Amino acid sequence: MKSRERLVLALKHEEPDRIPIDFGALRVSSIDALAYCRLRKSLGLPDKPVRVAPQTFINTVEYGSNIAEVEAEVLDFFHVDVINVNRVLEPRGPLTEISDEWKKWDVDGYVLEVQRDVDILEDEEGWVLTLPDSPLVPGGKKYRMLKKDFTCVELWRKNAPLKDATSIEDVKKFDWDLFKIRDEVLNGIKKRAEHLYNKTDYGLVLFDVGSLHANIGQVLRGWTQWLVDLKIRRPLAEAILDRAMEVLNYNLHKYVEALKDYIQVIGFADDLGTQEGPQISPQL
């Protein structure tokens, strides 16, 4: 049974010849880039730079997760059935609107690769990564990766676009089109999906197409302030959530219409927890 058939049967709640295997099609099913370097070594694979997968979110990319793009030889080793259509290593589709120029980044004795337009500054504590400027994040998304434990802090969230909003009118004035998928981005995804559908037998996934809590509420208001909004500024929070739902519904319809003939899974994800427990009370 081919991988795509296996995935489709499982999604239909029918029994395939075995459980479909995923390793890296989703941000949450992948692996930290440094851990992946060690995995390659344990598998007896030759040393080579490991590419950090830029995580796509609507019209932008993110590097906060620092996860590896799993190579074809590792996909084959683990009999993987599912891949993300926005992969930046073979098997992949044309990267029409995604940068395909890479530079090396030395971290803890390993060599990683990031896109050439990512600025990297090293200091005693670690590294600061700055992504290109974007309308949603003027100055570019900025991350700090610490040498002591290689955790990554999203510095750019301190400059949340609606951090000073005090009224529903402020929410209405925000340019919500910034969260709507642009035609050139959607066309690029469609070209990759069509290529991978016709040239491979993998099940195809588009993940991280949006969320209410992490990718809109926290992005617009800041992590801490958004949690406070949910508790004591409910009208403001609800106004943001209402507009966010409109945008996500718009995007979902655009994705489905463009990709329905090629992709088997479109995935939403949200950040409701931390390493230690829920971000918010279940009652809230």
Image: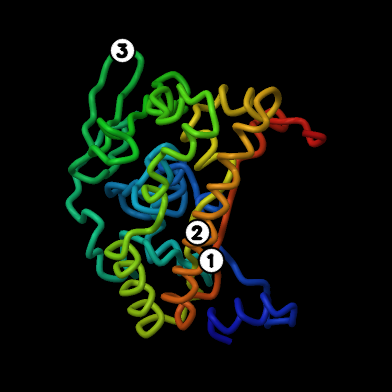
Which one is earlier in the sequence, the residue at label 3 or at label 1?
3
99 is higher (above) or lower (below) than 37:
below
Residue 60 x/y as whole percent: 34, 48
Q: In this rendered view, identify the residue nearer to me: 17 or 237.
A: 237
The type of residue carrying mark 3 is: Glu
181 is higher (above) or lower (below) than 170:
below
Residue 128 x/y as whole percent: 30, 25
> Which of the labelled discs sits on residue 266, or is there none?
1
What residue does disc 2 label?
A: 207
Answer whether labels 1 and 2 touch (C-beta < 8 Å).
Answer: yes
- 10 Å neighbourhood of mark 2: few (<14), some, or many (≥20)? many
224 is higher (above) or lower (below) than 177:
above
Q: In this rendered view, identify the residue nearer to me: 150 or 266.
A: 266
The type of residue carrying mark 2 is: Phe
Q: CA distance from mark 1 to mark 2?
A: 6 Å
Quarter holding residue 19: bottom right
- The residue depicted at 42 percent of the width and 37 percent of the height is 64
What residue does disc 3 label?
A: 124
The type of residue carrying mark 1 is: Ile
**Farthest residue in the front direction?**
169
- The residue depicted at 23 percent of the width and 24 percent of the height is 121
**Farthest residue in the right direction?**
283
